[in-house]
Image (tube, helix red, strand yellow):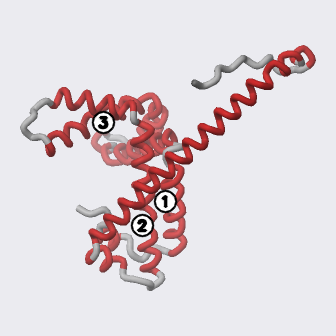
């Protein structure tokens, strides 16, 4: 299985250049800023997944597909943030069990692997979201770029995906790693600026307290400097 599938390229061949360009722009945003808005993307994915699932099973419960999908999507979206850590724990545990089954088939301890993977998925949630959004943005940009070049007649995207899958895999993997590193750098820079701003506010706090009786705002609470 390769990251760039020729069958997917063939199914969406012929998309308009505007749609392809929009897909590339969305992919770049995911690739560079996906980890920062991880709550938004999680809620969006859970809501869409629940809506699609509701459309598929609504008829079995004598409910209109649109009504069933809409109700399930709204319910899942409202509970998404509350269930986010539970899903991260379960997803990390299942991934750890599958990885252990393929890499260490002789060590039959699924209970231990599930809980170790679950705790790792829970504590490294932000890291996994950065990695997943970087990979998703890379794939979306790659597919959209190939479709755009194919629609403009610059290359045959299907032939490229069929003849050079390993090269495309390495290119997508390298781009995903680069996006992960850039997200780490941007997040570190954002946190540094936030700490500097909090330190500046704390330095101004005594003067604000002296002027508080003459202002309408409440006196600021004294912050604690980060260690």
Residue 92's tag is 3
Instruction: Estimate the spatial distance between the alpha carbons at disc 3 and disc 1, rounded to whole Å.
Output: 25 Å
Q: How much space separates mark 2 and mark 1, taking CA atoms? A: 8 Å
On-image quarter of the C terminus: top right
Q: Earlier in the sequence, mark 2 or mark 3?
A: 3
Residue 134 in the image: above or below residue 127: below
Please give the name of the residue rendered at 87% of the width and 16% of the height, measured from the top-left corner. 210
Quarter of the image where one finds residue 2: bottom left
Residue corresponding to mark 1: 27
Find out whether the residues at labels 2 and 1 contact each other: C-beta distance under 8 Å: yes
Mark yes or no: residue 141 visible.
yes
Residue under the point 43% across and 61% down: 140
Give how far across and how far down residue 72 sits, in percent. Answer: 41, 38
Circle 1: element type: helix
Q: Is 61 or 208 nearer to us in this picture? A: 208
Q: Quadrant of residue 153?
A: bottom left
* Number of residues whose C-alpha sits closer than 10 Å to that of mark 3, classed few (under 14), some (14–19) or many (20 or more): many
**Is residue 67 visible from the viewing direction of this image?**
no
Residue 93, image x and y in percent? 26, 33
Residue 223 found in image quarter:
top right
Which residue is at 56% across, 47% downward? 186
What residue is shown with label 2? 142
N-term mark: 2 or 1 = 1
Q: Is residue 217 above or below residue 179?
A: above
Q: Which of the image's four quarters has the N terminus? A: bottom left
- Residue reaching furthest left? 106
Q: Secondary structure at mark 2?
A: helix
């Amino acid at each position: 299985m390769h990251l760039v599938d020729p069958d997917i390229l063939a199914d969406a061949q012929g998309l308009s250049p505007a749609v392809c360009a929009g897909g590339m722009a969305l992919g770049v945003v995911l690739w560079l800023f996906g980890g920062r808005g991880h709550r938004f993307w999680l809620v969006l994915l859970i809501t869409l997944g629940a809506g699609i699932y509701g459309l598929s099973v609504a008829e079995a419960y004598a409910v209109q597909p649109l009504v069933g999908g809409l109700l399930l999507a709204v319910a899942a979206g409202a509970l998404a943030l509350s269930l986010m850590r539970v899903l991260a724990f379960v997803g990390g545990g299942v991934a750890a069990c599958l990885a252990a089954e393929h890499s260490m088939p002789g060590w039959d301890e699924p209970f231990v692997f599930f809980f170790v993977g679950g705790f790792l998925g829970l504590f490294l949630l932000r890291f996994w979201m950065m990695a997943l959004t970087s990979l998703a943005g890379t794939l979306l940009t790659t597919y959209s770029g190939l479709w755009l070049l194919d629609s403009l007649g610059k290359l045959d995207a299907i032939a490229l995906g069929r003849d050079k899958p390993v090269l495309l895999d390495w290119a997508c993997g390298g781009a995903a790693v680069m996006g992960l590193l850039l997200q780490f750098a941007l997040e570190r820079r954002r946190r540094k600026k936030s700490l500097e701003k909090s330190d500046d506010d704390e330095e101004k706090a005594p003067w604000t307290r002296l002027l508080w009786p003459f202002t309408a705002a409440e006196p600021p609470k004294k912050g604690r400097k980060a260690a």
